[in-house]
Amino acid sequence: MSVVIVCYNTDAGSDEIDKANRELREKIGEIKDDLPDGCFEPEVNTKVAEVAGVLLSLSGGGYSYEELSAYAEEIEDALSEIDGIYKTKLVGKVEKQVTVEVDSDRLNQLGFSLSEVNQVLYAQNLEIPNGALENEAGKIYVKTEALYQSLDDMKNIIVGVSRQTGAMVRLKDIASVYMESKDDAYKCKQGDKNAVLVAAYFKDDRNIIPVGKKVRETLENLRESLPSDLDLSETAFQPDDVDKSTDNFAGHLIAGIILARSPASILFSIHK
């Protein structure tokens, strides 16, 4: 995943910002066809209030997205407990789905149809998203409810009774049931390593500089508990930008005071 941050001039009015946003979307639209195959369509987020104040990257060679997500959830939980953080979010967490891949030959041999299997799954209160039934491949993608604690529970669902032998036919008798990543899942990379991003959002009514210090203290403690071959790095850290702006303002203010006082000092020395 690539994140590009666009900064507006501080003296820009709302009309100018709206115009700039429109032009930005137009420019992005012009280049999206030039992106490599496999890239998702670029997203432009102009909701400034919803921009993450902290964006962290957790990456590691040889780690799966599932493993990275487990560690990232621990980081997310720790950040969510900090006073001044109102929301956290994982970006790049690869969601899993249950896939039921039916053996069409076995299905025909036992005298069942794919639609009958589909109806049985519906009857078991399993949620099958629209378009999730692939007739040619014999695949059914399923969202499971808490009733099924494991894949074995699903595999043992009774599909029906064999018309030939009268024996009960279970799902595992006619299909492979397994977990797999969703095809449309966002996947992040840092260099050539798998990565997951952790985003944290500051409360509007808080001074984010001390909150940011608490965030860094928390991250230092977390790094000590992470495996040494995992890299937890800051991709964006808004308190640093605010702190620099404050320092620059203070520097300009002091310089202005010195310049304002200089003529008076000179005048005093002349009169003396």
Image (cartoon, helix red, strand yellow):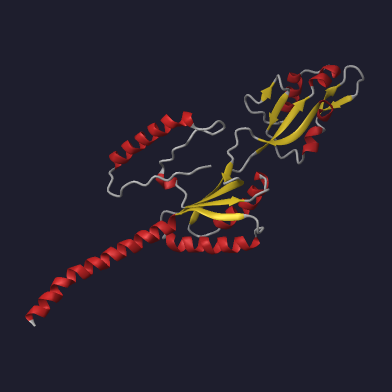
Q: Quadrant of residue 149?
A: top right
Say whether residue 261 is visible: yes
Outermost residue toward the right in this view: 165
Q: Quadrant of residue 261?
A: bottom left
- Residue ID at (71%, 19%): 136
Q: In the drawing, does residue 105 fall left or right of residue 139?
A: right
- Residue ID at (72%, 22%): 137
Percent position of residue 57, x then y: 56, 51
Relative to the observer, which residue lies in front, 76 or 20? Answer: 20
- Residue ID at (58%, 57%): 78
Q: In the drawing, does residue 73 fall left or right of residue 6?
A: right
Relative to residue 152, is residue 140 depicted above or below?
Answer: above
Say whether residue 124 is visible: no
Q: Quadrant of the C terminus?
A: bottom left
Relative to residue 215, is residue 51 depicted above or below?
Answer: above
Relative to residue 194, is residue 204 depicted above or below?
Answer: below
Q: In the drawing, does residue 68 fall left or right of residue 27?
A: right
- Residue ID at (43%, 59%): 240
Percent position of residue 34, x then y: 47, 30
Percent position of residue 145, x then y: 70, 37
